[in-house]
Image (spheres, rainbow, N blue to C red):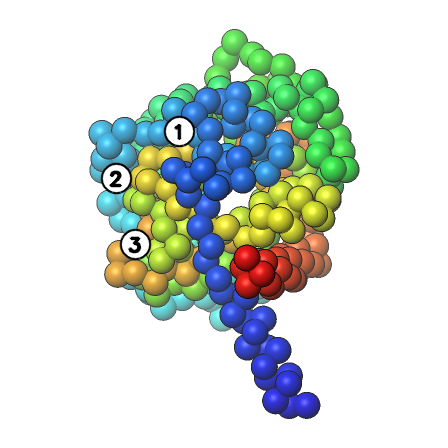
Amino acid sequence: AATATGGTILTCHHFENQRRILEAKSSDDYGCKSSTVTGALSSLQTSGVAIVDNLRLTPTTINEVMNMPAANTIPTQLKPPKRPQQQRRRGPPGANMVPQDEPWRLSAYGRYHRLENHLGEEDIRVLEQIEQRILPLVQGFFEQEGKGQGSVGGGDEGLESTATRTTSTTTTNNTIMDGIYRSELQLMTAVPGSGNQSWHKDNRARGLSIIVPLVDFTPDNGGTQLLLGSHDTNWPLFANGGARVIHAPAGSIVAYDSRTIHRGLGNETNEGRPALIFCYDRVESPPPGCGTLGSVGTSYQGRLIDILTGARNAVSSENT
Protein backbone atom coordinates (compact mmCIF):
# COMPACT_ATOMS: atom_id res chain seq x y z
CA ALA A 1 0.00 0.00 0.00
CA ALA A 2 2.82 2.37 0.87
CA THR A 3 4.52 1.64 -2.46
CA ALA A 4 1.31 2.32 -4.37
CA THR A 5 0.74 5.56 -2.47
CA GLY A 6 4.29 6.70 -3.15
CA GLY A 7 3.93 5.88 -6.83
CA THR A 8 0.70 7.86 -7.03
CA ILE A 9 2.30 10.88 -5.37
CA LEU A 10 5.27 10.77 -7.73
CA THR A 11 2.99 10.45 -10.75
CA CYS A 12 0.88 13.43 -9.63
CA HIS A 13 4.05 15.43 -9.01
CA HIS A 14 5.26 14.59 -12.53
CA PHE A 15 2.00 15.71 -14.15
CA GLU A 16 1.87 18.87 -12.02
CA ASN A 17 5.40 19.95 -12.97
CA GLN A 18 5.07 19.63 -16.72
CA ARG A 19 5.77 22.88 -18.59
CA ARG A 20 3.86 22.52 -21.84
CA ILE A 21 4.31 25.51 -24.11
CA LEU A 22 1.80 28.04 -25.39
CA GLU A 23 3.82 29.70 -28.15
CA ALA A 24 3.13 33.10 -29.61
CA LYS A 25 4.37 31.88 -33.01
CA SER A 26 2.70 28.48 -33.02
CA SER A 27 -0.35 27.49 -35.00
CA ASP A 28 -1.16 24.93 -32.32
CA ASP A 29 -1.99 27.62 -29.79
CA TYR A 30 -5.70 26.95 -29.10
CA GLY A 31 -6.57 30.23 -30.80
CA CYS A 32 -4.59 32.35 -28.32
CA LYS A 33 -2.42 34.19 -30.83
CA SER A 34 -3.88 37.14 -32.69
CA SER A 35 -2.58 39.87 -34.96
CA THR A 36 -5.49 42.24 -34.22
CA VAL A 37 -7.40 43.53 -31.21
CA THR A 38 -10.62 42.08 -32.65
CA GLY A 39 -9.06 38.63 -32.87
CA ALA A 40 -7.68 38.97 -29.35
CA LEU A 41 -11.13 39.78 -27.97
CA SER A 42 -12.50 36.62 -29.58
CA SER A 43 -9.66 34.57 -28.08
CA LEU A 44 -10.25 36.05 -24.63
CA GLN A 45 -13.88 35.00 -24.83
CA THR A 46 -13.12 31.39 -25.79
CA SER A 47 -9.80 30.39 -24.20
CA GLY A 48 -9.48 33.26 -21.72
CA VAL A 49 -6.01 34.12 -23.06
CA ALA A 50 -4.66 36.20 -25.97
CA ILE A 51 -1.17 37.07 -27.23
CA VAL A 52 -1.56 40.21 -29.35
CA ASP A 53 1.11 40.58 -32.02
CA ASN A 54 0.34 44.07 -33.32
CA LEU A 55 0.65 45.69 -29.87
CA ARG A 56 4.16 44.38 -29.10
CA LEU A 57 6.60 46.89 -27.58
CA THR A 58 9.66 47.94 -29.53
CA PRO A 59 13.18 47.30 -28.19
CA THR A 60 13.52 51.07 -27.66
CA THR A 61 10.46 51.11 -25.38
CA ILE A 62 11.71 48.08 -23.45
CA ASN A 63 15.05 49.83 -22.91
CA GLU A 64 13.21 52.89 -21.63
CA VAL A 65 11.39 50.73 -19.10
CA MET A 66 14.57 49.04 -17.96
CA ASN A 67 16.16 52.46 -17.44
CA MET A 68 13.37 53.71 -15.16
CA PRO A 69 14.45 54.59 -11.59
CA ALA A 70 12.40 51.67 -10.21
CA ALA A 71 13.99 49.22 -12.64
CA ASN A 72 17.45 50.29 -11.51
CA THR A 73 16.71 48.75 -8.10
CA ILE A 74 15.18 45.52 -9.38
CA PRO A 75 16.33 42.49 -7.32
CA THR A 76 18.69 40.14 -9.10
CA GLN A 77 19.07 37.39 -6.49
CA LEU A 78 17.26 35.78 -3.59
CA LYS A 79 17.19 37.81 -0.40
CA PRO A 80 16.36 36.63 3.12
CA PRO A 81 12.80 37.70 4.00
CA LYS A 82 12.34 40.63 6.40
CA ARG A 83 9.29 39.83 8.44
CA PRO A 84 8.58 41.61 11.73
CA GLN A 85 8.20 39.14 14.59
CA GLN A 86 4.97 40.71 15.88
CA GLN A 87 3.27 41.16 12.51
CA ARG A 88 0.23 38.95 11.96
CA ARG A 89 0.26 37.18 8.63
CA ARG A 90 -2.61 38.07 6.30
CA GLY A 91 -3.46 37.48 2.68
CA PRO A 92 -2.19 34.84 0.25
CA PRO A 93 1.02 32.86 0.82
CA GLY A 94 4.09 35.09 0.66
CA ALA A 95 2.11 38.34 0.57
CA ASN A 96 3.49 39.62 3.88
CA MET A 97 6.94 38.08 3.89
CA VAL A 98 8.31 41.65 3.89
CA PRO A 99 6.87 44.77 5.58
CA GLN A 100 4.29 46.65 3.53
CA ASP A 101 6.47 49.76 3.40
CA GLU A 102 9.23 47.87 1.56
CA PRO A 103 9.39 48.89 -2.14
CA TRP A 104 9.83 45.29 -3.35
CA ARG A 105 7.36 42.74 -1.96
CA LEU A 106 7.25 38.96 -2.28
CA SER A 107 4.33 36.94 -3.66
CA ALA A 108 6.28 33.67 -3.55
CA TYR A 109 9.87 32.67 -2.89
CA GLY A 110 12.08 34.79 -5.16
CA ARG A 111 9.18 36.66 -6.85
CA TYR A 112 9.45 40.40 -6.22
CA HIS A 113 6.79 43.01 -7.01
CA ARG A 114 7.02 46.80 -6.99
CA LEU A 115 3.47 48.14 -6.80
CA GLU A 116 2.16 51.46 -8.06
CA ASN A 117 2.37 53.19 -4.67
CA HIS A 118 6.14 52.58 -4.74
CA LEU A 119 6.65 53.86 -8.30
CA GLY A 120 7.91 57.39 -8.90
CA GLU A 121 6.58 60.03 -11.28
CA GLU A 122 9.08 59.09 -13.98
CA ASP A 123 8.17 55.40 -13.65
CA ILE A 124 4.46 56.19 -13.94
CA ARG A 125 5.05 58.42 -16.96
CA VAL A 126 6.83 55.65 -18.86
CA LEU A 127 4.30 52.97 -17.92
CA GLU A 128 1.27 55.11 -18.76
CA GLN A 129 2.72 55.69 -22.23
CA ILE A 130 2.68 51.91 -22.65
CA GLU A 131 -0.85 51.84 -21.25
CA GLN A 132 -2.00 54.11 -24.07
CA ARG A 133 -0.89 51.37 -26.47
CA ILE A 134 -3.02 48.68 -24.81
CA LEU A 135 -6.09 50.80 -24.05
CA PRO A 136 -7.95 49.79 -27.26
CA LEU A 137 -7.78 46.17 -26.06
CA VAL A 138 -8.94 47.10 -22.55
CA GLN A 139 -11.80 49.26 -23.80
CA GLY A 140 -12.88 46.63 -26.32
CA PHE A 141 -12.87 43.94 -23.63
CA PHE A 142 -15.28 45.82 -21.36
CA GLU A 143 -17.42 47.15 -24.20
CA GLN A 144 -17.81 43.54 -25.37
CA GLU A 145 -19.27 42.76 -21.97
CA GLY A 146 -21.65 45.70 -22.22
CA LYS A 147 -22.97 44.14 -25.43
CA GLY A 148 -23.75 40.93 -23.57
CA GLN A 149 -20.77 38.99 -24.95
CA GLY A 150 -18.59 38.92 -21.85
CA SER A 151 -20.19 36.37 -19.52
CA VAL A 152 -18.89 32.92 -20.43
CA GLY A 153 -20.30 29.60 -19.36
CA GLY A 154 -22.15 31.00 -16.37
CA GLY A 155 -18.92 32.44 -14.94
CA ASP A 156 -18.39 33.41 -11.33
CA GLU A 157 -20.50 36.56 -11.27
CA GLY A 158 -22.59 36.71 -14.44
CA LEU A 159 -22.93 40.50 -14.16
CA GLU A 160 -23.07 42.80 -17.13
CA SER A 161 -21.44 46.19 -17.25
CA THR A 162 -22.83 49.23 -19.02
CA ALA A 163 -19.34 50.61 -19.49
CA THR A 164 -19.00 52.96 -22.43
CA ARG A 165 -15.98 54.52 -24.06
CA THR A 166 -15.11 57.94 -22.71
CA THR A 167 -13.17 60.77 -24.33
CA SER A 168 -10.55 60.69 -21.58
CA THR A 169 -8.04 57.93 -20.94
CA THR A 170 -6.11 57.39 -17.71
CA THR A 171 -6.85 59.93 -14.97
CA THR A 172 -5.42 60.60 -11.55
CA ASN A 173 -7.83 58.12 -9.95
CA ASN A 174 -6.95 55.42 -12.52
CA THR A 175 -10.41 55.51 -14.17
CA ILE A 176 -10.17 54.66 -17.86
CA MET A 177 -13.87 54.13 -18.70
CA ASP A 178 -17.21 54.64 -17.03
CA GLY A 179 -17.14 52.20 -14.10
CA ILE A 180 -13.78 50.67 -15.08
CA TYR A 181 -10.47 51.44 -13.39
CA ARG A 182 -6.86 50.31 -13.38
CA SER A 183 -6.67 48.17 -10.26
CA GLU A 184 -2.98 47.30 -10.54
CA LEU A 185 0.19 48.61 -12.12
CA GLN A 186 3.47 46.99 -11.20
CA LEU A 187 6.97 46.00 -12.15
CA MET A 188 7.93 42.48 -11.08
CA THR A 189 10.68 39.94 -11.47
CA ALA A 190 11.35 36.27 -10.75
CA VAL A 191 15.00 35.88 -9.77
CA PRO A 192 17.07 32.73 -10.41
CA GLY A 193 16.06 29.98 -8.00
CA SER A 194 12.59 31.42 -7.36
CA GLY A 195 9.67 29.12 -6.56
CA ASN A 196 6.25 28.49 -8.05
CA GLN A 197 3.27 30.61 -7.08
CA SER A 198 0.08 28.95 -5.91
CA TRP A 199 -2.64 28.63 -8.53
CA HIS A 200 -4.95 31.64 -8.25
CA LYS A 201 -7.35 34.00 -10.00
CA ASP A 202 -6.74 37.74 -10.11
CA ASN A 203 -10.46 38.30 -9.57
CA ARG A 204 -13.55 36.12 -9.30
CA ALA A 205 -15.40 38.76 -11.32
CA ARG A 206 -14.69 39.45 -14.97
CA GLY A 207 -11.73 41.76 -15.51
CA LEU A 208 -8.63 41.97 -17.68
CA SER A 209 -5.01 41.31 -16.71
CA ILE A 210 -2.11 42.11 -19.04
CA ILE A 211 1.49 40.91 -18.71
CA VAL A 212 4.30 42.49 -20.72
CA PRO A 213 7.51 40.39 -20.65
CA LEU A 214 10.64 42.55 -20.55
CA VAL A 215 12.74 39.53 -21.54
CA ASP A 216 11.70 36.46 -23.51
CA PHE A 217 9.24 34.31 -21.53
CA THR A 218 10.18 30.62 -21.65
CA PRO A 219 9.27 27.51 -19.66
CA ASP A 220 12.76 27.51 -18.12
CA ASN A 221 12.65 31.05 -16.74
CA GLY A 222 9.17 30.59 -15.32
CA GLY A 223 6.83 32.22 -17.81
CA THR A 224 3.23 32.48 -16.61
CA GLN A 225 1.33 29.17 -16.67
CA LEU A 226 -2.40 29.34 -17.37
CA LEU A 227 -5.23 26.81 -17.37
CA LEU A 228 -6.79 27.56 -20.74
CA GLY A 229 -10.51 28.16 -20.55
CA SER A 230 -10.68 28.13 -16.75
CA HIS A 231 -12.52 31.47 -16.81
CA ASP A 232 -15.44 29.32 -17.98
CA THR A 233 -17.34 26.79 -15.86
CA ASN A 234 -17.58 24.48 -18.88
CA TRP A 235 -15.21 21.64 -17.88
CA PRO A 236 -14.52 20.12 -21.35
CA LEU A 237 -13.23 23.45 -22.69
CA PHE A 238 -10.26 23.72 -20.36
CA ALA A 239 -9.84 19.95 -20.00
CA ASN A 240 -8.81 19.96 -23.66
CA GLY A 241 -6.17 22.69 -23.35
CA GLY A 242 -4.84 22.08 -19.86
CA ALA A 243 -1.98 24.05 -18.33
CA ARG A 244 0.21 25.95 -20.79
CA VAL A 245 3.27 28.14 -20.19
CA ILE A 246 3.55 31.41 -22.08
CA HIS A 247 6.47 31.27 -24.52
CA ALA A 248 6.70 34.73 -26.04
CA PRO A 249 9.38 37.27 -26.97
CA ALA A 250 10.15 40.38 -24.93
CA GLY A 251 7.60 43.15 -25.44
CA SER A 252 4.69 40.81 -26.17
CA ILE A 253 1.24 41.76 -24.91
CA VAL A 254 -0.19 38.74 -23.06
CA ALA A 255 -3.77 39.33 -21.93
CA TYR A 256 -6.03 37.03 -19.94
CA ASP A 257 -9.45 37.13 -18.31
CA SER A 258 -8.98 37.82 -14.58
CA ARG A 259 -11.00 34.68 -13.77
CA THR A 260 -8.43 32.47 -15.53
CA ILE A 261 -6.61 30.21 -13.07
CA HIS A 262 -2.86 30.78 -13.41
CA ARG A 263 0.47 30.94 -11.60
CA GLY A 264 4.00 32.18 -12.10
CA LEU A 265 6.56 29.37 -12.29
CA GLY A 266 9.96 29.19 -10.67
CA ASN A 267 12.93 30.55 -12.59
CA GLU A 268 15.38 27.74 -13.39
CA THR A 269 17.86 29.92 -15.33
CA ASN A 270 20.72 32.18 -14.25
CA GLU A 271 19.00 35.42 -15.29
CA GLY A 272 16.04 37.31 -13.87
CA ARG A 273 12.63 37.41 -15.60
CA PRO A 274 11.22 40.96 -15.28
CA ALA A 275 7.77 41.92 -16.54
CA LEU A 276 5.10 44.61 -16.31
CA ILE A 277 1.59 43.90 -15.06
CA PHE A 278 -1.55 45.97 -15.75
CA CYS A 279 -4.94 44.94 -14.30
CA TYR A 280 -8.36 46.42 -15.00
CA ASP A 281 -11.60 45.79 -13.11
CA ARG A 282 -15.06 47.17 -12.50
CA VAL A 283 -15.46 49.63 -9.65
CA GLU A 284 -18.29 47.52 -8.24
CA SER A 285 -16.23 44.31 -8.20
CA PRO A 286 -12.65 45.03 -7.12
CA PRO A 287 -10.17 42.15 -6.85
CA PRO A 288 -9.73 39.55 -5.55
CA GLY A 289 -13.45 39.03 -4.96
CA CYS A 290 -12.96 36.26 -2.38
CA GLY A 291 -11.46 35.61 1.04
CA THR A 292 -8.74 33.28 2.25
CA LEU A 293 -10.89 30.15 1.96
CA GLY A 294 -11.79 31.02 -1.62
CA SER A 295 -8.12 31.52 -2.49
CA VAL A 296 -7.18 28.18 -0.94
CA GLY A 297 -10.01 26.50 -2.83
CA THR A 298 -8.83 27.96 -6.13
CA SER A 299 -5.28 26.80 -5.41
CA TYR A 300 -6.39 23.19 -4.92
CA GLN A 301 -8.78 23.39 -7.87
CA GLY A 302 -5.89 24.53 -10.09
CA ARG A 303 -3.66 21.69 -8.89
CA LEU A 304 -6.40 19.12 -9.52
CA ILE A 305 -7.15 20.40 -13.03
CA ASP A 306 -3.43 20.54 -13.82
CA ILE A 307 -2.88 16.93 -12.73
CA LEU A 308 -5.99 15.57 -14.47
CA THR A 309 -5.35 17.34 -17.76
CA GLY A 310 -1.69 16.32 -17.62
CA ALA A 311 -2.75 12.69 -17.21
CA ARG A 312 -5.29 13.02 -20.02
CA ASN A 313 -2.69 14.49 -22.40
CA ALA A 314 -0.21 11.76 -21.49
CA VAL A 315 -2.77 9.07 -22.32
CA SER A 316 -3.66 10.83 -25.59
CA SER A 317 0.02 10.96 -26.57
CA GLU A 318 0.45 7.25 -25.95
CA ASN A 319 -2.57 6.47 -28.10
CA THR A 320 -1.37 8.45 -31.09
Of tags 3 and 2, the one toward the viewer is 3
Which badge, 3 or 1, is on the more N-terminal residue? 1
Residue furthest to the top in view is: 167
* Front residue of this view, candidates 142 and 28: 28
- Distance, label 3 to label 2, CA atoms, is 13 Å
Examine the rendering and report whether any part of residue 276 can be seen: no
Task: Decide if residue 63 is on the left or right side of residue 11.
Answer: left
* Residue matched to label 2: 66
> Distance of mark 1 from mark 2, alpha carbons?
21 Å
> Could you tell me residue 40's position as x and y percent?
51, 28
The mark found on residue 272 in the picture is 3
Q: Residue at x 53, y 35 (%)?
A: 31
Q: Tell me whether circle 3 and circle 2 mark residues in contact (CB < 8 Å).
A: no
- Residue 22 vertical placement versus 210 (above, below): below
Pick whichever of labels 3 and 2 is earlier in the sequence: 2
Pointer 3 local density, CA inside 10 Å: few below 14, some 14–19, many at least 20: many
Residue type highlighted by circle 3: Gly
The residue drawn where x is 59% and y is 38% is 47
Q: CA distance from mark 3 to mark 1?
A: 24 Å
Q: Which mark is residue 53?
A: 1
